[in-house]
Image (cartoon, rainbow, N blue to C red):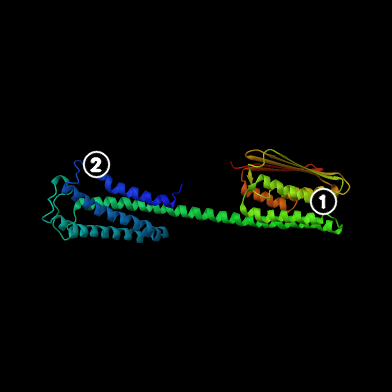
Amino acid sequence: MRLTGRFILPLHIIGWTSFMFLPFFFFPGGNLQDPGFIHMIVTKLISDILVIGVFYINLHRLTPDLLLKGQVKSFILALAGLFVAAELLNAILFFGIIEPLLKLPHFPKPNPTFQDRPPRPRGLFRIPVPGAFGMSISFTFVILLSTLIALIQERTRIREAQQLAVIEKVKAELTMLKLQISPHFLFNTLNNISWLARKRSDKTEEAVIQLSQLLRYIIYQPENGPVMLSQEIDHLQHYISLQKMRLPANASVEFTCRGDVHVQMIEPLLFIPFIENAFKHGIHNQAESPIRILLTAEQNRVQFRCVNQVNSLNEPDLQNAGIGIQNTKRRLALHYPDCHTLTIDDTGNTYTIQLDLQLKS
């Protein structure tokens, strides 16, 4: 799990505080009133501050700009230069500023108990050997740690970029599928209204109102993500009511809902293509044309079943029964991967759609 921004700063503060002050708890006889102990604290703090600077220089500059770009030799040379610069700066700060202050007459002589190194050899820079060795260990540790963190961050960034690309691709594909669903539905419904208008039916105005409600749902609801199952059912009922206006006497539609439909959230426009297909290919002017639609809702499951007769005079290619069903299959695969079962059964006289959705709790 990736840490969010608000946790990173406190984590760094806690980590560096522990790194700087925890070692003092293991020194016996530590006393802030003893100038020797203060001498050791000042010496260590200078070294630690430089080490922390090395950590962030490598984390944000050297590893990202050199190592991750394949410039290994430049990375190693930069680390060597950084180490030398840190050692020199440590010596300059201590011997040029801190040590003269500690030698002032009013500053008590340190207790030998807290002398962290033997008498220093005389030389050009007089760098204490034990201090240099300790800083070398700290330098190596923070370089390894900061490099590892930078590598992990880069890997995480690449993985997130790949995931974002996949998500954007899926969103674009879903948008395309929704745009394909709307015209397909609109063309079928306008044909129905045109049929009513040619008959000069009094139901034409009502059909236009029904269509406006359906279009409002199709245009706006998909942009808001999942909807209540009850909203989707209302949409289906509006569509069925609109279709009933032009059904012949031998056709019948039965739409049954079971269970509580006010607790489930579902992607919109998943069922309508199957019902469209039933009206388009299951209605005949002479033969009996029953359409049976059953929707069963449970807490985390929705089952949809649509059955219609297949008339030989108007028999479609049932395995490729329109762009609406093909798009719905794709949307199911995108929204409910491994969480749905779609069965299309053609017995020759009857065409059955069975959709079983496992919803997220």
The image quadrant that residue 72 belongs to is: bottom left
* Disc 1, SS: loop
Q: Which residue is found at the position 74% from the left and 47% from the top?
A: 237
Residue occupying the point 48% across, 55% down? 158
Q: Is residue 175 left or right of residue 276?
A: left
Question: Which of the two discs, 1 and 2, labels the residue nearer the N terminus?
Answer: 2
- Quarter containing the C terminus: top right
**Above or below: residue 234 compared with residue 173:** above
What residue is rendered at 65% in x and 53% in y?
Answer: 221
- Name above or below for residue 342 compared with residue 56: above
Label 2 CA crowd tier, 10 Å (few <14, some 14–19, many 20+): few
As measured in the structure, the alpha-carbon distance from the residue carrying label 1 to the one carrying label 2 is 89 Å
Mark seen at residue 245? 1
Q: Position of residue 8 (x, y in %)?
A: 40, 51
| 116 relative position to 165: left or right | left
Q: Is residue 316 visible?
A: no
Give percent across and percent down for residue 135: 25, 52
Closest to the observer: 341 or 16? 16
* Amino acid type at mark 1: Met
Q: Amino acid at mark 2?
A: Phe
Q: Residues within 10 Å of mark 1 (few under 14, many from 20)?
A: some
> Which residue lies under the disc numbered 2?
26
